[in-house]
């Protein structure tokens, strides 16, 4: 079964807009995704370097990550194939070192969740475990299925079509690029803010 994956993010230099005309994009091995993070009074970058996954999305996804000062953390995430296929839970709270995710995805979105998002109309809810596999489900409402998100790719400003979801009970938001083989998280506001700034 085709696997796809998603993960994570905070306030940065990107602008989300509502406009027509978007770029389509596919994550590849070697890509570097830089997110801006704001957590309380701290602001830093979260940098993801994609190490490996196969073109069909059927194997584990591996990426290295680091947080710049003042967070100063680094590690490696490996998302198991089972999680890449079936998980609807996100791993968003990082600690130094290597982490194998068996029931969660991070940065990327699991195939079954991606499929559910594809068929969810505006105004309907999707259950997501935003704080890990052992956390309670949270209901996120599909607010916009054509949310225009702007970032830079190799120094060029581009806009892509995304999904915007919101937990109306607590105000948490998710912005997801749900296209291609490996859908991924562009931005989140979940107690901290994270947003994609650039891709190389």
Image (cartoon, rainbow, N blue to C red):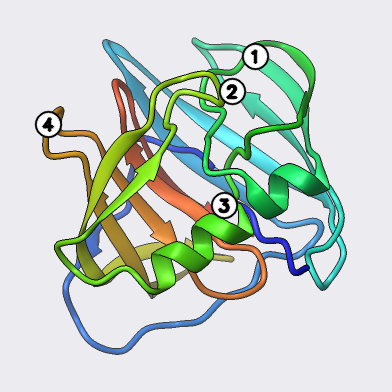
**Residue 11 shows in the view:** no
Q: Which of marks 3 and 4 is nearer the N terminus?
A: 3
Query: Measured from the top left, where is residue 23 in percent x and y?
Result: 45, 82
- Kindly check if marks 2 and 1 are in contact, taking CB atoms under 8 A apart as contact: yes
On residue 169, which mark appears?
4
User: Which residue is labeled 2 in the image?
Assistant: 67
- Kindly check if marks 3 and 1 are in contact, taking CB atoms under 8 A apart as contact: no
Q: Work out how far the residue at label 2 is from the one at label 1, CA to CA, in angstroms.
A: 5 Å
Q: In this view, does 143 lie to the left or right of 112?
A: left
Q: Which residue is drawn at 53% across and 36% down?
A: 89
Q: Work out how far the residue at label 1 is from the one at label 4, CA to CA, in angstroms.
A: 32 Å
On residue 109, which mark appears?
3
Q: In this view, does 176 lie above or below 34?
A: below
Q: Which of marks 1 and 4 is nearer the N terminus?
A: 1
Q: Work out how far the residue at label 4 is from the one at label 2, CA to CA, in angstroms.
A: 30 Å
Q: Residue at x 70, y 54 (%)?
A: 85
User: Which residue is labeled 1 in the image?
Assistant: 73
- In the image shown, does 74 or 84 lie closer to the viewer? 84
Q: Which residue is drawn at 67% across and 71% down?
A: 181
């Amino acid at each position: 079964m085709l696997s796809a994956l998603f993960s994570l993010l905070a306030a940065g230099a990107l602008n989300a807009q509502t406009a027509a005309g978007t770029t389509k994009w596919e994550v590849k091995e070697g890509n570097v995704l830089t997110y801006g993070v704001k957590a309380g009074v701290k602001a830093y970058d979260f940098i993801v370097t994609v190490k490996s996954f196969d073109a069909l999305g059927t194997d584990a996804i591996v990426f290295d990550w680091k947080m710049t000062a003042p967070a100063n953390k680094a590690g490696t995430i490996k998302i198991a194939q089972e999680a890449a296929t079936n998980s609807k839970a996100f791993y968003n709270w990082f600690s130094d070192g290597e982490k194998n995710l068996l029931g969660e995805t991070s940065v990327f979105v699991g195939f079954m969740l991606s499929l559910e998002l594809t068929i969810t109309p505006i105004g309907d809810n999707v259950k997501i475990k935003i704080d890990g596999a052992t956390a309670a489900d949270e209901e996120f409402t599909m607010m916009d299925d054509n949310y225009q998100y702007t970032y830079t790719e190799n120094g060029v400003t581009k806009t892509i079509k995304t999904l915007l979801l919101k937990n109306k009970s607590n105000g948490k938001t998710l912005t997801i690029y749900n296209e291609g083989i490996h859908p991924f998280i562009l931005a989140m506001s979940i107690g901290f803010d994270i947003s994609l700034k650039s891709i190389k």
